[in-house]
């Protein structure tokens, strides 16, 4: 996992609530056994007018020329609800997103983002609304500063928080499996005390 | 519905969730996310291959292969037990699972195995699901197993890898929510209606950040299979997990199952399980109370499970919502679903029916469905409707056939298929076409879930049968299915 400290990039505003993982990466693209190849199918059913994905939908926000190269996704409440498929954050990451900014995230999706280094930034609904208003007028770049936990948009700046360990994992890009394997003695001690039926 | 915190508190009293948490807490170190022990890991073909690949990349073993069980369910054909029957991509994933399980010493229920079936159906029916355990699976409907008083939740592929390598997971402690369903439900009201009504009241994200414990007379009187239907959909209102405290019903269900403890170990387990309940005076972060008698047959009208309504009402209008985001969601959902505000729910015509999924594919669901078929006294599936029934596992299939249920369905014009996840998510060839409108007993009505441009209405098995025969939704409260009496 890559380390994340600060990122400045173009923000794409996806004005929808309850965006589920079936929209982020539809099931017909989940048959891969590799970790790559999902970005091209991100938001497939919204992004393309046909099932084969040959006709771009001009009304979908990521197809607008001014959002080409966007690396930050601005969206609304309960983003990533539904299925546990980690393919959803993989697709967002492979498309080029470094962070998703929303007023709330579904729990499993949030954890999956942390585990792959895609930064989930939670702001209040008022702050999200303010950012949507800004993006209506201009194509804006935003800075996600993980050192100071700030979202900086022009002259505005918003604080956000992350769990201490999540923040550490993102900043250091740690291998969480390796981290836990270093505690094998603690795990074995726990196992020795478990009831036999467990 | 009332929403409040418990008035009385007792510092020593803890909730069921806290007991499960404490009994599995391996380490809670300052500055680190707590580490929990995982008793049982269930895997399937779709969310495991990249986890296995990463293990191999790092040259790490599976620490406790005996604590993991694999099944094939998401991708498989419901017409043939051949591994290649659902296409090249599916076959590749299924073969990869087979190869990985062999390499890492994990037991697998492959194509045609007597124990094969949907992961959340086979866990309970084989006794792999036990009260007081932590159960995880790379699938969000793992919440199903909470019906046994197990802390069960869905995980991503990175976490699947973490469990493989360490038999633990890092988890942030959730808040607690008690949902009490008081009194008894009316005649013909199923567990599916109870959970859809709860989701309708809380909204699609009403329990995000929470573990929910369901209680009250209407929950306690449910059978295990009905409790599974309730817990299964906990994720559909955002809950990390759903729980129902184990009781005599739970213990009677688990006893004698293939993988359940036996002899002295069983006795010890039962002694421990009898202590697994929320103490009097324990404080929940949120409490919701619902009167069971107010719950009517439920049908989703929109594109999230929270967009649900009683059968005797009309499709809502954007004007019914004061919140701007909800209003906008309603406009979008009506457009996608091809519905007009104000139309009667019972006027919605359907052309497809799917009875199955980890929500409603167990033997009691099929008995309830067959019961409704019988009430129609020889009437068949409408000429304008294609209806399929997909049992949750080979054991369910076998039992349904032994009881004559499959013949009742076939005689009435339903297709009787082989077990699998099937049209719940349409990863195989059981996919709806654009514009198809389906009465589905599954758990998600998201845009395109059952096929690009298709429209899903989530309902109970009883409603699905009535809709299949009549071609539209029916106020089955009037039909008064005897399900709650006969189950």
Image (cartoon, coloured by chain):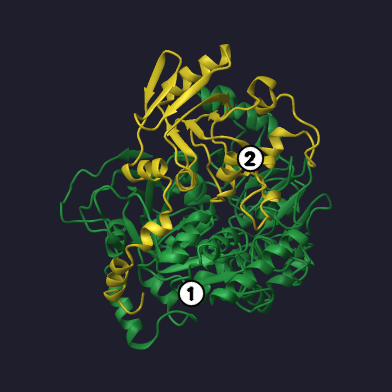
Chain colours: A yellow, B green
Residue B486 placement, left or right of B378: left
Up-down: is B116 above or below B76? below
Which residue in the protein does label 1 denote? B65
- Name the residue furthest bottom: B263
Badge 2: chain ID: A
Q: Could you tell me if the residues under marks 1 and 2 are in contact, i.e. CB atoms within 8 Å?
A: no
**Residue at the extreme left of the image, as rendered:** B11
Callout 1: SS: helix
Q: Chain of mark 1?
A: B
Decide if residue B413 is on the left or right side of residue A140. Answer: right
Marker disc for residue A156: none
Q: Going by the image, does B338 lie left or right of B213?
A: right
Q: Is residue A159 left or right of residue A106?
A: left
Which of the two residues, B397 or B157, is positioned nearer the viewer here? B157
The local secondary structure at tag 2 comes to helix
* Picture layout, residue A15 above or below residue B13: above
Up-down relation of residue B398 to residue A169 (above or below): below
Please identify the quarter of the rendering in which residue B453 is found: top right
Q: How many marks?
A: 2
Q: Return the residue nearer the eye: B314 or B325.
A: B325
Picture residue at 47% right of the left edge, 51% below the top: B234
Q: Which residue is mark 2?
A: A23
Residue B16 percent location from the top left of the image: 30, 59
User: Could you classify mark 2 by the number of other residues whose Cα lies within 10 Å: few (under 14), some (14-19), or many (20 or more)?
Assistant: many
Q: Position of residue A25 (x, y in %)?
A: 64, 44
State whether discs 1 and 2 lie on one chain.
Answer: no
Residue B121 in view here: yes
């Amino acid at each position: 996992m890559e380390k994340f400290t600060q990122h400045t990039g173009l923000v794409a505003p996806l004005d929808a609530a309850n965006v589920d993982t079936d929209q982020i990466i539809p099931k017909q693209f989940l048959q891969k056994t590799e970790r790559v190849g999902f970005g091209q199918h991100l938001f497939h059913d919204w992004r393309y007018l046909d099932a084969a994905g040959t006709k771009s939908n001009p009304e979908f926000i990521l197809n607008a020329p001014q959002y080409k190269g966007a690396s930050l996704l601005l969206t609304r409440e309960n983003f990533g609800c539904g299925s546990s498929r980690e393919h959803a954050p993989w697709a967002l990451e492979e498309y080029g997103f470094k962070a998703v900014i929303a007023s709330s995230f579904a729990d499993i999706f949030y954890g999956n983002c942390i585990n792959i280094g895609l930064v989930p930034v939670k702001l209040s609904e008022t702050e999200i609304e303010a950012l949507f208003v800004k993006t209506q007028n201009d194509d804006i770049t935003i800075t996600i500063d993980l050192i100071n936990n700030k979202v900086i948009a022009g002259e505005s700046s918003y604080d956000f928080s992350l769990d201490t360990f999540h923040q550490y994992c993102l900043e250091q890009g740690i291998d969480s499996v390796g981290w836990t394997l270093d505690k094998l003695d603690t795990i074995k001690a726990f196992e020795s005390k478990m009831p036999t039926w467990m | 519905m009332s929403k409040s915190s418990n008035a009385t508190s007792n510092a020593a009293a803890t909730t069921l969730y806290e007991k499960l948490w404490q009994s599995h807490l391996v380490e809670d170190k300052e500055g680190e996310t707590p580490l929990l022990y995982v008793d049982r890991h269930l895997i399937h073909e779709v969310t495991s291959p990249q986890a296995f690949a990463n293990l191999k990349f790092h040259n790490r073993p599976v620490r406790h292969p005996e604590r993991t069980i694999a099944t094939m369910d998401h991708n498989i054909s419901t017409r043939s037990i051949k591994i290649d029957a659902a296409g090249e991509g599916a076959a590749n994933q299924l073969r990869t699972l087979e190869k990985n399980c062999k390499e890492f010493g994990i037991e697998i229920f492959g194509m045609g195995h007597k124990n094969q079936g949907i992961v959340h159906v086979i866990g309970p029916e084989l006794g792999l699901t036990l009260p007081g355990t932590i159960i995880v699976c790379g699938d969000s409907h793992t919440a199903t197993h909470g019906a046994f008083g197990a802390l069960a939740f869905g995980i991503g592929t990175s976490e699947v890898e973490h469990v493989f390598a360490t038999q633990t997971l890092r988890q942030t402690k959730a808040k607690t929510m008690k949902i009490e369903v008081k009194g008894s439900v009316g005649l013909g009201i199923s567990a599916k209606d109870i959970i859809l009504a709860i989701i309708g009241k809380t909204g699609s994200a009403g329990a995000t950040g929470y573990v929910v414990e369901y209680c009250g007379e209407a929950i306690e009187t449910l059978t295990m299979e009905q409790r599974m239907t309730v817990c299964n959909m906990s994720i559909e209102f955002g809950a990390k997990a759903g729980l129902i405290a184990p009781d005599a019903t739970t213990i009677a269900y688990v006893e004698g199952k293939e993988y359940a403890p036996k002899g002295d170990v069983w006795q010890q387990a039962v002694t421990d399980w009898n202590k697994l309940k929320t103490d009097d005076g324990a404080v929940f972060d949120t409490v919701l109370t619902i009167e069971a008698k107010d719950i009517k047959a439920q049908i989703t009208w929109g594109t999230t499970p929270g967009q649900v309504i009683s059968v005797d009402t009309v499709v809502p209008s954007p004007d019914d919502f004061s919140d701007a985001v909800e209003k906008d969601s309603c406009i979008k959902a009506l457009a996608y679903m091809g519905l007009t505000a104000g139309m009667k729910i019972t006027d919605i015509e359907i052309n497809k029916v799917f009875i199955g999924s980890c929500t409603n594919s167990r033997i009691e669901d099929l008995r309830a469905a067959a019961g409704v078929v019988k009430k129609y006294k020889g009437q068949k599936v409408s000429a304008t409707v294609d209806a399929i029934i997909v049992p949750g596992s080979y054991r369910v299939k076998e039992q349904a056939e032994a009881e004559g249920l499959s013949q009742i369905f076939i005689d009435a014009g339903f297709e009787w298929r082989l077990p699998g996840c099937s049209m719940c998510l349409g990863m195989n060839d059981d996919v709806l076409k654009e514009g198809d409108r389906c009465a589905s007993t599954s758990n998600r009505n998201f845009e395109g879930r059952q096929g690009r441009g298709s429209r899903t209405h989530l309902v109970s098995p009883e409603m699905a049968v009535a809709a299949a025969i009549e071609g539209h939704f029916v106020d089955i409260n009037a039909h008064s299915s005897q399900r709650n009496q006969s189950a």
